[in-house]
Each structure stands twice: as C-alpha cells, then as structure tokens.
Image (cartoon, grey):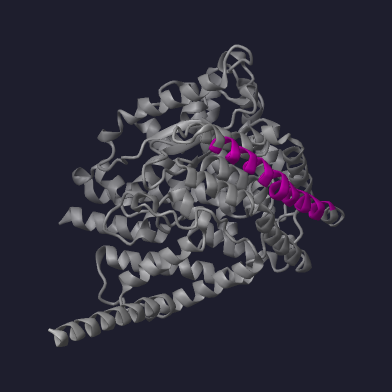
Amino acid sequence: MKRFIKWLGLGLVTVVLLTGVFVLHTIYFKPLSLNLFYNKVFIEFMFRNPETLSSLRLLEPMGLHYKNDELSDSSPARAVEDAAITRRNLEHLLAYDSSELEGEEQLSYAVLSWFLEDIVAGEQFMYHNYPVNQLFGVQSNLPTFMATQHLITSRREAEDYIARLNQFDEKFAGVIQGLELREEKGIIPPRFVVQKVLKEMHEFSAQPIEENILYSTFIEKVEKLDQLNVDVRKSLELRAASAIRLSVLPAYRQLIKYFQRLKPKATQNHGVWSLPDGDAFYDLKVRANTTTDMTATQIHKIGRAEVRRIEAAMDQILCVQNLCEGSVGTRVQALSQDPRYLYQPGETTGDQILQDYQQLIEEITVKLPDWFGTLPQAPVKVERIPEFKQDTAPGAYYNPPTMDGSRPGIFYANLRDFSAITQWGMPTLAYHEAMPGHHLQIAIAMEIKGVPMFRNFLPFTAFSEGWALYSEQLAYEMGMLENPLHNLGRLQAEMFRAVRLVVDTGLHKKRWSRERAIRYMLEKTGMPKGEVVAEVERYMVMPGQALAYKVGMLKILELRERARQELGDKFDIRDFHDAVLTHGGLPLTLVEQEVDRYILEKQQ
C-alpha cells in the first residue's frame, strides 16, 4: 500500500509537471497543434486588452472576472510588445504544415494568416495615425466604454468600475507618450483635429462631477443593485466622485495641456500624403481596408462611374417631386428641409425617434426568414449616442452584443439635431446598422460554432461595411422601400458611399484640399454642410476606411450575380447568404473563394 501511495504521488507530481511544461510551451513557444495555437493567439490578445475582454464578457458566464478592474495599456512600450508578439505568432503559424487542411480548418488558417500578415506589413507605419481625434480616442472612447460597456450587476463590478476610474491618469499618460513620439517623427494631426479635440475635452472637464457621464451612469447602475444597503451605496458613490476628481480630471488636464502646446505646430489640413512616406502609407491602408489589390487610382475611377449611375437614378425620383433644376445635391438638400418629412422640435421627443427606428427594424425582421437560412439569436435595440459626444460623432453606429447575453446589439442613433433627421432616410439607416445589416452579420459571426474563437470576432471592414451597404439594396429588393422617397433615401446613402471612393482617394492620393472635398460632396450628396464637413474630416483621420463600404458591396453583388448565372434554377438567395455569412468576417478574396465553393457544391 505504501508503495502504491508513493507511486501514485510520484505519478501525480509527474502529471502536474508535464501539464506545467505543456502550458509553458504553449504560451512561450509554437503550440503542438493548430487548434492550441489558435486558442493561444485569441486568449493572449484578450488578456492583453482588458477593455475588449469586458466588452465581450467572455469569462463572466464561467464565474470569472479576470482583468475587469484594469484598463488596456495604451503606451508606446505596449505597442512595441504587441508588434513583436504579432510577428512571433505569424512565424509560428507559417511553420505549421497547412497542405492537408480542408474546409473550415483551411479557412481558419487562411483568415488568420491574412490578418497577421496585414498587421506585420503595417508595422513600419505603426505611428502614422492620430490616436486622439474628433471621432475617437481615449478622451471620448474611454468614458463611452465605462458608461455603456462596463456592466455593473454586483458590488464587485462596482468596485472594478472605481478601480478603472483610478487608472485614467496612467492610461492618459501612456497615450501622451505615444503622441509625443509621433510628434518627434513628424506625425502632426491636422489643425481641425487639435481644435475640435480641445473643445471636446474642455467641455467634458468643465462639467460638475455630478453631471459627468462617468459619475451619473455609475449612480444609475449602482441604484439598481438591490443587494446593497444605503451605507455601501453611499460609500461607492463617494469613492467614484473622488476617483473622478483625483484621477480622471487631472488626466484630461494633462491631455489638454499637451494639445495646447501642439496647437502652434498644427498649421495644415492635408491628407496623409503630407506625412513621411505618406503615399506608401496610403497604399497600405487601401489594401488593408478593401482586402483587395485594387489601387487608389482604380478605386477613384470606379467611384466616379458609380456617382454618375446613382445620380441618374436619383434625378428620376426628384423630377417626379417637381425638383428638376440644379445639381442632385442642391435638390436633395431642398427636399431635406421640407417640414413634411422632418421631426419638429417641441412636437416630438428623442424617445419617439428611437421608437420609430425600432419599429422599422421589427417590420423587416418579420420578412427575413424568406431571405436568410441562418438568423442570429441575439436581439438588437436602438439607443441614442451619449450626449457628451454627439456633436462630433457620426449619424449612427453599432455595438455588438455580449457573448453572455447580458447586453443586446445596439444601434446608436445621433439625436443632436432633430431637423437633420429626414423621415425618408430613416429606413435605410436602420437596415444598415441593425437588420439585415451590421447586427445580423456580426451576431451571426459571434454565434458560429465549431470554429476557433478568433473567427467569431475578427474584423474585416470591407466585409462588414460592404455587407451593411449591400443590405440596404437587399431591403429594397425585399419590398421595404416601395415609397419613392424612401428609395431616394437608399440611393442617397449609396451615393454617399460612392462619393467616398472619390473623396478619400482625392484627399490622400490626388492631394485634394479639404475644401475641394467638401464642395464635391455637397454637390453630389445633398447632405447638410455640417455633416459633409464632419465626413470629410473623418476621412482625413481614417485614411482608406471609407473605401471599404462600396468596394465590399460591389464584390458581394458581383458574387451574387455569378452564382445566379452559374446555378440558374438551383440558385436560392438563402443559400447564397449562408455562404457569405456563416463563416464569419473574411477578406473579400476569401469570401469569393467560399462563394465559388458553394456554387460547385450546388452544381453537383
């Protein structure tokens, strides 16, 4: 018996040691199998990005709350570490023998290799960006994350929230280090970026703590925790206010101080061609955002042709409305100001507009089973963009649901100006952001089973935005836009994306001025000048991103027509949509591969 116990003990020690060696080998070296490698890459990324981990709530269903009291590191040192990890992961991935992989296994390998190779290719330009700008950055994204993504369902999560507030100063310090490094390299943001960021931060900092979104949303969340007594709740509220006073506001003051010092150096409003090696940088952004080998010149030419085509279609509808004179943009602008199609301040509320969007989503959702073989389980709801950021935010955006079902997908609508919301444009926006657009595509991807977890989340802009724009035309084909003005809203939205092809490449490749881009966009889209200015300035801080929408849509339409032609009577739109959607986000080259595979299978 003693020998048996001794043998058992030695065996357990051996198992523990071998397990430890296996875990260490998996973490620090090439894992023994591809699936282990995939899991390692995904887990490593998540654990290095606590904010992303919290947003998705991957661990909470298992009772784990790892890193929910930490903020993601935004320092240059962390960026260098991340780059080294990516290079190492790519090296390990390419060392596996992929010659005998088939089906989803082959696709997983192709997706991850494309993604990692793209990041490594861009490493030489890792500082060619403006991480604090009028659209996003720590100054607006972090408060929004705390208010909308950090859930508080227990005292522990309330404590985590306060712990994160106390790290704002450290987080901002890392961002400032990165900004200073960019400044040394000659990466100076456009003048308008500095001006608008300073205005935003001054307004945020000037609010009384009681009105600050970081405090007010914390109070709302804590008040819903029935298990907390009055004394505990009061203590939490006081500590949150103290953290805002001692960490958050000093962090903003330091960032304001930096931008005030930078202001005299920001003297231009140019595209990225003006940065060091700017032309090569833009070429790389074009490839990364379109996931194709198309050149900026080719895309500019396609954009011009699409603008002419859509302009003719819009002209026909406008003439029926007795609007035949002047540019399409001028006539759409006139229609946009017609009070018959506008919400009037004082006569409606923001809640009513949100309800109208929700109703549009519910109406089209009923029809989706006739057009899709696979539909998501996660619901979607409409909320307003937080007021503190609505002035510089786009007209709408989407946030995906959590993995544990604690938060649905959310379509955020901008309600900064009721008079800018045309009722004939609302359906297309709802379809783009929610169903059958972003929510349907992203939620389906998140719910795919039997693939490495990175496949549920990898973002490819040309695919996701191309799908959302395609969904606008699909809604028309589904009979949801029979009202000619609603169809005009769809065409205006498509014109908007076609104009982007011209303007983005114009700014960054053809060296258009900001003012020329604004004039062109006003003439072609009919959007209000304030929105046009915001859009052009968006393209200047996100080079190439605006190309993804129309390029992606055109590729999906091209593949759909190919499937129709080759399958004839065997073509089923539901099967086609499954072929596109049920593999998660993909580069467009791999979307084409999967559609070709679907065509071959249906032909057999």
Snapshot quadrant of residue 330: top right
Give the vertical position of 587 relative to 495 (above or below): below
Q: Quadrant of the N terminus?
A: bottom left
x and y, in percent, of residue 288 in the image: 53, 61
Snapshot quadrant of residue 73: bottom right
Image: magenta residue range: 232-260
Please, which residue is most extreme toward the left here?
1
- Residue 395 in view: no
Residue 238 colored in magenta in the image = yes
Q: Residue at x 64, y 25 (%)?
A: 417
Q: Quadrant of the C terminus?
A: bottom left
Residue 318 colored in magenta in the image = no
Give the vertical position of 21 relative to 315 (above or below): below
x and y, in percent, of residue 326 in the image: 67, 26
Q: Residue at x 77, y 59 (%)?
A: 188
* 287 to the left or right of 554: right
- Depth check, front residue: 38 or 342: 38
x and y, in percent, of residue 432 in the image: 46, 37
Q: Magenta region's main secondary structure?
A: helix
- Depth check, front residue: 108 or 451: 451
x and y, in percent, of residue 80 in the image: 60, 72
Q: Residue at x 43, y 32 (%)?
A: 381
